[in-house]
Amino acid sequence: MAMNSQGRPSRPVHGVDPGAYPDTFSGSRGLDQAEPLLFERGELNNTGVDLPELKGTPSRLGTFERDANMGMPGLSEPEAMRHYVRLSRKNYAIDLGLYPLGSCTMKHNPRLNEKMARLPGFIDVHPLQPESTVQGALEVMGELAHWLITLTNTKAVALSPKAGAHGELCGMLAIRAALDAKGQTHRRRVLVPESAHGTNPATAAQCGFICDEIPADDTGRVDLAALEAKLGDDVAGIMLTNPNTCGLFERDIIKIADLIHKSGGYFYCDGANFNAIMGRVRPGDLGIDAMHINLHKTFSTPHGGGGPGAGPTVFSEALAPFAPVPYVIQEGETWRLVEQEADAEGEPFGRMVAFHGQMGMFTRALTYMLSHGSDGLRQAAEDAVLNANYILARLKSVMTPAFDGTCMHEALFDDRFLKDTGVTTLDFAKAMIDEGYHPMTMYFPLVVHGAMLIEPTETESKSGLDRFCDTLIGLAEAAKGGDKDRFLAAPIHAPTKRLDETRAARTPVLRWTPEAAE
Ligand SMILES: *Cc1c(COP(=O)(O)O)cnc(C)c1O
């Protein structure tokens, strides 16, 4: 059988079971076109530009003159453009539909945010401009800092970290600097609940700490007795998420903060789930010392194709002196950036980034805050929790909730409802793709077997949630009814079918190599 580079038949195939090969010759379906790599589509001898041959000018490149084709894909402008537009159409996005990834808070990004961020006075500024010419931009940063500090009841904020994980690094470096300043260099053990997001232990290790895992109790929360048993004078602190990654509020959080503080450690709170409590609870009142806030989660800025995240980190009174530069201050009517450690009031541990952070995201996040107001932000948190509980209530008779009772902003199920069906969490998620739904977060948190973590956020309507729940109920009933094939073959309607995920992870092909270089 003649195959193209993607393993699809390139000519009609006769006398073969129609199920054994994709159902079109081209690999395209409807008007959704198959897309080879740019290198496969291009021809080495073509070029998108025509430059005249140089006449009468001797080359001055000497031995550096290229003697072989450099191997760039040769495509015209429309061919190159179409390649990327076709790829973009295969991308799933919050602008296309519900994105129920738990822990990720994939909420609608209001268009008002985009409009404000594109104002020439914001979009055209450069980080090296004199301060006097960017007073408005600095005021945006100052105002955003004020909102973040007020919402969390903390003392200082570093706006510069560029992701939640980067914010964790910022917070833990401040903790390390505070311990070092007290001469407590022996405090190097960090307590991390076993339900924690993987970035928490990774951050602690990156800062030179040793991680010590605290087990969860059978209600999905930190086991307080186990935590107490682990305290000691080598403990630097705890990294705790609240609401936690099981979608539950840590009821004993004030007790946990007291225990950590009494034993001489600091409390790092992973604030990725702040959307569930913003405007309702101030983490500073719960005793936290540092917490990052994912602007791309809670404050509706785009997650952005792996791009422009922002993870400002707030600090308690105890850690504020160690917060990094730069930060903005207001002197009378004038805004100023404190850029140098020597000019700072406390003892900053250094800086996180070359410049000042993601200015475009600061503008979007502040737009969100100002358009909602403090009451609107609280309402968003309440609606997020209400939506998650609606899903939990509708699905709990056919799927199996991991824990009893109500949840916060995300509903967590385990795979007990799939027992003896031959269908796994992964198969179930793949079948959702065929139904037009991006899967929920799977197999996380690790403390729950075959976990399915669903976070609808506040921006979904009741009818949208009902369509989603009806689909999941249909799938759960199909699995229990023995319709295993529907799941094992899924996704059958996606451009790419079931992948060999183990091979993709173990032997990734990250580089295109030409078959025969000229
Ligand atoms: C998203 C998330 C992080 C990491 O944030 P990034 O912005 O993706 O780096 C950390 N902890 C939890 C619980 C999260 O959900």
Image (cartoon, rainbow, N blue to C red):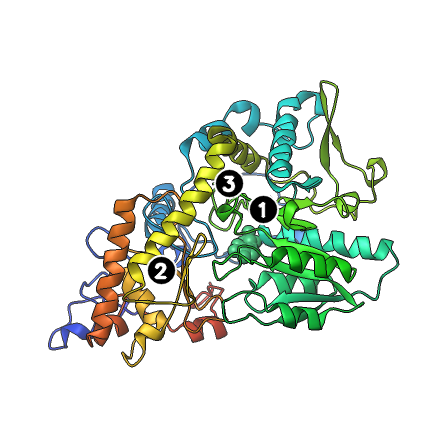
Dot 1: element? loop
Residue situated furthest top in the rendering? 333
Residue placed under numbered mark 1 in the picture: 293
For label 1, being within 8 Å of ligand 1 is answered no
Residue closer to the observer: 461 or 224: 224
Looking at the rendered structure, the kind of residue marked 3 is Phe
Report the disc number at residue 439: 2
Q: Is residue 201 left or right of 117 when viewed as pictured?
A: right
Residue closer to the observer: 259 or 21: 259
Residue closer to the observer: 333 or 150: 150
Query: Which of the two discs, 2 and 3, sits closer to the camera?
Result: 3
**Cα distance between the residues tagged 2 and 1:** 25 Å
Residue 494 visible to the viewer: no
Quarter of the picture for ligand 1? bottom right
Q: Measured from the top left, where is residue 53 in percent x and y?
A: 49, 41
The answer to whether 483 is drawn above or below residue 326 in the figure is: below
Q: Quadrant of residue 340?
A: top right
